[in-house]
Amino acid sequence: MATPLRLAALLLVLVAAFASAARADLVVSRADRKVDLTSHIVRVLTSLKVENAGSEPVSKVLLAFPNIQAKNLAAIRAFGTEGKVKGLSSVLPIEVVEPSGVPPELTFFSASLHKPLQKGKILHLDVLTVFTHFLQPFPEEITQADSQLVVFQDSSHYLSPYPVKVQTLSIRLPGGRVESYTKYGNTKLVDSELKYGPYEDVPPFSYNPIIVHFENNNPFAVAKELIREIEISHWGNVQITEHYNIVHGGARLKGEFSRLDYQSRPYARGVSSFRHLIARLPARAHSIYYRDEIGNISTSHLWSDSKKTQLEIEPRFPLFGGWQTTFTIGYGLPLQDFVFSADGKRFLNITFGSPMEEILIEKLIVKVVLPEGSKDIDVSAPFPTNQWQEVKYSHLDIAGRPVLVLEKPDVIPEHNLHFQVYYKFNNISLLIEPMMLITGFFLLFVACIAYMHTDMSISKNSPSYLAKLQWDEVQATVQQIQGIFHQCLAVHDKLETSLHDLSRTGDAKSCKAARKAADAQFKELAKELKPLLLSVQSSPQSYQIWPKLDDLVAKERELQDKLMARHATVVDSVEKKQRGQDIENRISSQQQKIAALRQEVESLLEYLSEI
Amino acid sequence: MLVLAPAVCILSGIALSEAFNVLTRSMKFQRPISDDTLPTAGDSTPGSSSTATITTSTKNANIKKEKMGTISKERSSKKSRKETELVGSSPVRPEKEEKLCVLPSEASAMGILFLIMLCGLYVIHCVWAAAEAYSAPSIVLTSRSHDGLHVYDDFRESYAWLRHNTEVDDKVASWWDYGYQTTAMANRTVIVDNNTWNNTHIATVGTAMSSPEKGAWEIFNSLDVKYVLVVFGGLIGYPSDDINKFLWMVRIGGGEFPHIKEQDYLRDGNYRVDAQGTPTMLNCLMYKLCYYRFAETDGKGFDRARRYEIGRKHFKLTHFEEVFTTQHWMVRIYKLKPQKNRVRGKLKLKLKSSSKTSLMRKGAGKKNPWQ
């Protein structure tokens, strides 16, 4: 490969050009590097013991990386402690610097110390650097029966602008076969750990390339693009939807895929493929769904407890090298865990990256959808991102919801820190949507009521309209007539009760008085009835019911007469002190007729009431 | 029979509401009222002035009570509907008043509770029927066994694989039953789909499936096909797979291309793929694509859908390459192998042909390759 040659050339150039231009003030007395190659994301932890050998206090420490490495650098963090004892370390801010007089093949970062390092003092500095796409699969295409071998290139000497007194390098391999590694003198491979060093008194900018070719079958899950949408609803829910496009980033599969071999001997065939992806969601996540463009995917498991929710998903097919798949995960979170208020503003505090474990995201787009009416939107993120704003129209939106979009390339799990979005939201604006719905329905109902009550007939002289008017009149009159008849019936009942009283008490006088009263009432009711009957008769619409009415009137009169007659006979017989049995015999025929007539009257009334 | 379903639903709804009416009225009339007029049978003696209203409502109750005695689902409610109309029109019904009977209130309370429970159970039954009997998509198969529910989502697995792991312009050849599904879910061009009217088209695919490997490869190559998809149910016992449909491929292909003869694929009029199968059958593309390395799953190649062991167990594919098989072997996808780059020169061809013939002679001395 061309790269080791290139690096060797670099080494020579650097040693030659910078032997003189080395920074003389800081000296690294001890540098221990631990490289973790167990996953496809390479993590290097460098522990430096920096001593100020110069005369002036130094407030910046420079860290150098060759450009090839710096291109793949996804995260760099530095922690510093002063003094000899390793105490509490504080995170130091890091920035890219371009010191003068350096070749373009190196990238420099400088860590700014909180307090300048005084002369003679020692600083313990821990630098964590994470590289992505750093393990090259070699060979690039493998069959199903092969295991995946990758190549790791680095330098056994720590590349630094300061001279290093003592340094070691320890590389942790994932176990399995180590195909080859560069041997320099006292290189040891013990228990999947490769140790280089210790090297003493190495000049600054020294670079000693090493190549390790080893087997790494851990899942190389790479998300080509992840779109993470966080939608805030002040009614109590934060809904997160994540769209993944996952590809296996290792050696590509060539040749055939045999399901038989994969199922019968999974550890020998398809050992570099992966089936499961684990996502750690925050606690109290609910309504979790997992689907793709075709439909729901049912191969997933969920475990939840009070601290976290763990979701294990299986894509529809196992992922071999070069295979890709897309899916969507969505879940809801309670609002009070993520949105808080401070100084009149509200802010959302939520993790930036994906909840999946050990996944490298080549392009991450986070969209924060704030409720309609949010103003003064502000973001504070722990690393630089591309930001812009969009508008999203959702249900019951008038102006749309403001969407804040953050974009970052090469996101790794170390980037899964919290970020905050500040915005102002008026509490009253929360009621806009319900008020809109209420007003809408209210207007609808008012319109319906108005429509029902307006008279939309085109002409007031149309015959059907007139007929309807007349029929209404007739109905009203009939109602009144009915009322009168009910009163008549009530009077009949009174008569009956008086008869009962008579049979009980034998008081004929009060009975007669009752009869007189009833008589008077009948006459009165008949008088009231007359004009009503006339009006009904005159109306042209009454042809249907007039015969019935007539019938009713006649029967009612008959009934009245019969009742009165019976009453009279009973009173007479009581006065004449006849026996009860004789009374009964005399009035029995009358009784039957009265009963029949009463039935007919009542049925006619019923009929009238039903029209 | 299904035509009667709406009528039955409506009538049973009416019957249920009438039953509720009767039961609630009997409860209502039996609760203690302030004035002491209990509507007893046939009593039309007047009481206080408010009896007028009570008697009219009693009459309504009476009508319904006499119907309640004969409640059976449909016919009585039909009859009762007719009777209400008659009763409404003709005002004379003195005799019906005599026959009413009021249910005791405990019985009607029990009756109401029972009907409510019945309606609840009905809702549960409807939900179960809709979930189990009416919601079986034929693309996701399920089966219940002693250790739970097995879901066979193989079709969607294969379509998702095609969608994501093949080029956009790649063409997929399969039997026309899967055409629309492939187009919609896998988003790839197919050769024939469910709505193809061109019989020659379908016959071409059928012929390709029925030909030996080389002939099939030629046909598919001329159609610019990259992937061939077959559905195989032998591992799990899925009965509607391509081997069971294969005879149709032969017939349709044979209808257009005379070199495909159906009799070649049948042994004594029977369609078999076991040791009794004809050599043409055991050598055709469909057989090979379905059963490629199938015998290695259990050593004997027992086909659970056909329920016998297959005839030809161990063979290699020369023109096709397996690129994907789903989890339960239901869908198998093969790729056409590209033609060899070098065509050997004439001299070498002669040598090759001579060596081939010697090999063939050797091969003839070996055992029957179909076993």
Image (cartoon, rainbow, N blue to C red):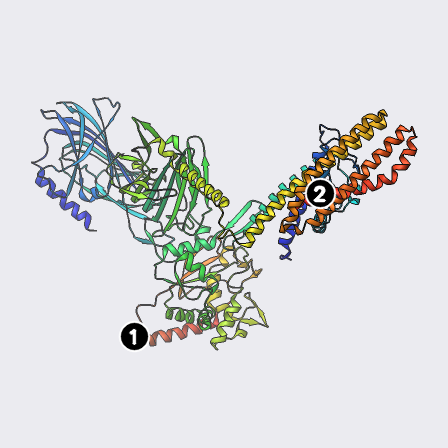
Residue A174 vertical placement versus B369 (above, below): above
Q: Quick check: B48 left or right of A375?
A: right
**Percent position (x, y) of residue A38?**
32, 40
Dots 1 and 2 on the same chain: no
Q: Which of B51 and A100 is in front in this view?
A: B51
Q: How far apart are marks 1 and 2 (CA)?
A: 116 Å
- For residue B243, the mark is none
**Percent position (x, y) of residue B197?**
46, 70
Q: Quick check: A508 left or right of B150?
A: right
Amino acid type assigned to the residue bearing label 1 in the image: Gly
Instruction: Give the farthest residue toward the left.
Output: A20
Amino acid type assigned to the residue bearing label 2 in the image: Leu
- Subunit bearing disc 1: B
- Subunit bearing disc 2: A
Q: Nearer the viewer, residue B28 or A112?
A: B28
Residue at 37% across / 34% down in the picture?
A430
From the image, state whether disc 1 or disc 2 is nearer to you.
2
Please tell me whether mark 1 sits on a helix, a strand or a loop.
loop
**Percent position (x, y) of residue A302?**
45, 39
Residue B371 visible in the displayed image? no
The reply to whether callout 1 and callout 2 are in contact (CB within 8 Å) is no
**Percent position (x, y) of residue B69?**
76, 44
Residue A565 picture quarter = top right
Q: On the image, numbered disc 2 is attached to which residue?
A: A605
Q: On the image, numbered disc 1 is attached to which residue?
A: B345
Q: Quick check: B233 left or right of A608?
A: left
